[in-house]
Amino acid sequence: MRTQRIPPWLILLTGDILMMAVVTFAGFATHDRRDAVSRMATTFFPLLAAWLMVAPWLGQFRGNESRLLPALLRTTLAAFIAAPMAALLRGLWLNSPILPIFVLVLAATSALGLGLWRAAWYLWRHRQPREAAHG
């Protein structure tokens, strides 16, 4: 039976989407909002749209990182570029002002969440087979 490999870009994109959902939900949960799940869309979709505009330009979906630190720096840079774009889209959607502290918190939490996910991805991709590690 032949198995088909999932392309790395699809795994990266799926993990990014899941991590953005976690970051967005955590943000609303910290504000003790009862409507966190229903209001999540107002941050999640703008963040996803901004990420999809920025991430490809910074090589976030290639999946061929050779060193962890430069890969994490690119992810952090992409998150800090995407956050103001996401805040602008969110502000337009809600017809509300864009608070600079919101942009900073969104950038920092997105960079942290995506960085953790991308570090896990990198370590999984570059793991050594058990036989080679003990040989």
Image (tube, rainbow, N blue to C red):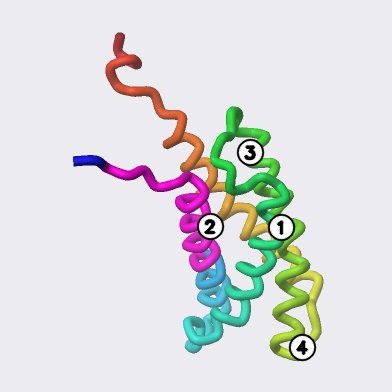
Q: CA distance from mark 2 to mark 3?
A: 14 Å
Q: Amino acid at mark 2?
A: Asp
Q: CA distance from mark 2 to mark 4?
A: 27 Å
Q: Position of residue 8 (x, y in %)?
A: 48, 45
Q: Amino acid at mark 3?
A: Ala
Quarter containing the N terminus: top left
Name the residue located 73 percent from the left edge and 77 percent from the top edge. 89
Q: Cβ–Cβ below 8 Å for labels 1 and 3?
A: no
Residue beneath disc 2: 16
- Label ID, residue 22: none
Q: In terms of sequence position, does the residue under pointer 4 or pointer 1 come before the other? A: 1
Q: Which residues are magenta?
A: 3-22
Compared across the picture, whether 117 is left or right of 131 comes to right
Name the residue located 39 percent from the left edge and 47 percent from the top edge. 6
Residue beneath disc 3: 71
Compared across the picture, whether 46 is left or right of 100 comes to left
Q: In terms of sequence position, does the residue under pointer 2 or pointer 1 come before the other? A: 2
Compared across the picture, whether 95 is left or right of 9 comes to right
Of helix, strand and loop, which mostly describes the magenta segment?
helix
Camera-near label (4 vs 1) is: 1
* 37 over 79 or under it: above or below: below
Q: CA distance from mark 2 to mark 1?
A: 13 Å
Residue beneath disc 1: 54
Camera-near label (1 vs 3) is: 1
Q: Amino acid at mark 4?
A: Ser
Q: In terms of sequence position, does the residue under pointer 2 or pointer 4 come before the other? A: 2
How many numbered dots are placed on residues in this image? Answer: 4
Residue farthest to the bottom, as pictured: 95
Q: Cβ–Cβ below 8 Å for labels 2 and 1?
A: no
Camera-near label (2 vs 1) is: 1
SS for tag 1?
helix
